Image: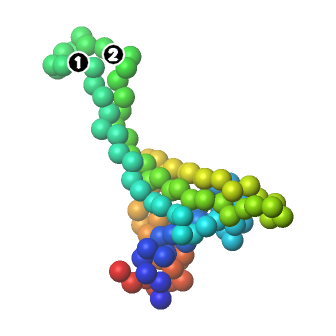
Amino acid sequence: MSSYDVALQAWGANRLSAEYGIPVSRIDRSSITVDMDFNEGMVCCEVPNNDCYCTQAISPSANVVINGRVLGGPGTGFVPRLLETRIDSLWFDFSEILREIVEAGDGVISL
């Protein structure tokens, strides 16, 4: 049985491995972080106005951000570096992600 944190790190390593084509064994699981990145957006008009138009407007957004480090060095064929991938909220399927995390925890996780 894996703890949720261990399963989350394994899931993050799997995602980074798939994104960068690096074997999961070369990703330092202890370096994995998974966070949410929220952007409330920006409106340009101070008051509601049907005639207001702004080229600087930014829509609200949210992303899951996964960071980790490659294990590398002389003789490994890999350069130590930081990796990052994002899952945009438009493509975030909570039930699918939860299934992947549980699967990464060998099918059973504890909190």
Label 2 crowding class (10 Å Cα cut-off): few <14, some 14-19, many 20+?
Answer: few
Q: What residue sits 46% from the left and 47% below the top?
A: 88
Residue 46 screen position, x and y as percent: 18, 19
Q: Is residue 95 above or below residue 60?
A: below
For image coordinates 61% across by 53% down, the residue present is 82
Amino acid tagged 1: Cys
Reply above or below: 61 against 69. above
Q: Residue at x 47, y 52 (%)?
A: 65
Residue farthest toward the right in the current orientation of the protein: 75
Q: Are marks 2 and 1 in contact (CB under 8 Å)?
A: yes
Q: Residues within 10 Å of mark 1 (few under 14, many from 20)?
A: few
Q: Is residue 39 left or right of residue 11?
A: left
Asked where in the image residue 55 lies, by quadrant, the reply is top left
Tell me if residue 24 comes above or below residue 46 in the rendering.
below
Residue at mark 1: 45
Q: Could you say which is closer to the camera, residue 82 or residue 87?
A: 82
Task: Examine the rendering and report whether any part of residue 11 can be seen.
Answer: no
Against 32, is 110 above or below?
A: below
Which residue is outermost to the left?
Answer: 47
Looking at the picture, tell me which residue is in the foreground, 50 or 23: 23
Residue 39 position within the rendered picture, expressed as x and y whole percent measured from the top left:
35, 40
Task: Find numbered disc 2 in the image and state the secondary structure of the residue it sits on.
Answer: loop
Residue 5 appears left or right of 40: right
> What residue occupies the far front of the structure in this picture?
74
Horizontal arrangement in the rendering, residue 79 relative to residue 66 (left or right): right
- Real-space CA distance between mark 2 and mark 1, rounded to the nearest whole angstrom: 8 Å
The x and y percentages for residue 35 are 41, 56
Question: Upstream in the sequence, badge 2 or badge 1?
Answer: 1
Q: Which residue is mark 2?
A: 54
| Residue 59 falls in image quadrant | top left
